[in-house]
Each structure stands twice: as structure tokens, then as C-alpha cells.
Image: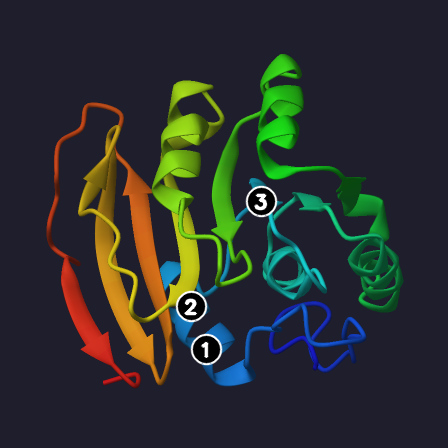
Amino acid sequence: MRVIAGSAKGRSLKAVPGKNTRPTTDKVKEAIFSMIGPYFDGGMVLDLFAGTGGLGIESLSRGMERGVFVDLDGGSIEVIKHNVQAARVAENAEIYRTEALRALKALEKRGLQFELVFLDPPYRMKEMDTLMAELAGRGLLAPRAKIVVEHDAEVIYPESIEGIVQMKRSQYGDTAVTVYRYEQDGEQQGEFNEETRDGE
């Protein structure tokens, strides 16, 4: 595992031991950032099921100003701490060991808003539409914020949720990536609303 682009390009990242965490492959990571970036001019990123922290770290490397990393697994938290140091983005990172919904409640109390959110949970979790509704309802999304959901390809998420509108869905083998954008007025733009397979 490595950082693909930006200020930390080429830096190696540690994986979480065992089979409970499924790191995003370089191919899928590159596809994600070509859809949502590829570079950023500041802003905050939330990596909610952070695992290794790879997606949040890649975002910081590509120009995001601050990242919040959340995971419930203690092993993952230790790996994230190592990886933000290895990528030299530790000063821009906050790392918390807690459950996702509890994290959202705490972030709401702080009045934070995110321009980019990653939801890459264990594949057994299929309630990301509920979490997206929580993100919107708790005021955690900046205008035009993007949300990236990495999930089992058999799962189909709604085209719109609480003003969050699907831009694109791509499939890579048994993995799918669905990208959403927060439209505060709920108005669907639709120009990116398409499906691709295997990066086509």
C-alpha cells in the first residue's frame, strides 16, 4: 500500500493485520480520486470507517487541509497513527476510536462541516444510506460536499437521500463505488448520474 499522488506520493502505508479490514486497491483508489478530485484546495475530509486511513491520507496528500479518522477497531487505530506519521500528515489529522454514529454526534456538537466523506465499512454493513441521512440531518456536510461509498457490488443504494444526490456508480469486480454530492436544495444535477463497470 502506498500514497498514489500529491505531497506524500510514493510513501508506504501499513496494512491492518488479519482479514477484517479490506484496504482499497490502488486501482479503485485511483478511480475514486479521478471522479472526485483529483486534487483539492483545502477543506475537511471525514474517513468514517478508516481502516488503514488510506483514503483520508490520500485526500490530505492531494490538498485537503484537515482529516478526521474514525474506526472502532483498536488495531486499525494504531495503524492509522503509524500511517499519518509515515505520510507526514499527522499535524493535519484527528484520530478517534469510536462507533460511527457516536462519532457523528460528537462532530455535530463541534459544529464541523466536511467537504469530503468516505464511507468504506465492512461489507456486512449495508446501512450507509442511513448514515448519509445522519450526515445531512446533523449539518455535517458543506455545500456541494462529496460522499464516497465503497461497498459490495450486490448492494444498490438510492439515487437520492435527504438532498444527497448520486453522481456516479462504478463497479470493479465484487466491489462498487457510489459517489454522491450534497445538493442543499435537493435539486438533482444529473450530469454525472451514470454507471460504469471495471473503470470503463
Dot placed on the residue nearer the N-terminal end, 1 or 3: 1
Q: Residue at x 60, y 21 (%)?
A: 105
Q: Distance between the residues labelled 1 and 3?
A: 18 Å
What colouring method underlies this structural image? rainbow
Q: Nearer the viewer, residue 40 or 146?
A: 146
Q: Which of 169 and 87 is in front in this view?
A: 169
Q: Quadrant of the C terminus?
A: bottom left
Q: Residues within 10 Å of mark 3 (few under 14, many from 20)?
A: many
User: Amino acid under label 1?
Assistant: Val
Residue 28 bears which disc, if any? Answer: 1
Are circles 3 and 2 on residues that touch, CB within 8 Å?
A: no
Label 3: state its secondary structure. strand
Up the image or down, 67 lies above or below 60; here it is: above
Residue 31 rendering spot, x and y as whole percentages: 40, 75
Q: Which of marks 1 and 3 is in front?
A: 1
Are circles 1 and 3 on residues that touch, CB within 8 Å?
A: no
Tag 3 residue: 45
Q: How many numbered tags mark residues here?
A: 3
* Residue 169: quadrant of the picture: bottom left
Q: Which residue is drawn at 79% across and 43% down?
A: 95
Up the image or down, 83 lies above or below 145; here it is: below
Residue 92 rendering spot, x and y as whole percentages: 77, 45
User: Amino acid under label 3?
Assistant: Val
Tag 2 residue: 32
User: Amino acid under label 2?
Assistant: Ile
Q: Which of 27 and 126 is in front in this view?
A: 126
Relative side of 129 to 59, left or right: left
Q: Quadrant of the N terminus?
A: bottom right
Up the image or down, 26 lies above or below 97; here it is: below
Q: Distance between the residues labelled 2 and 1?
A: 6 Å
Label 2: state its secondary structure. helix
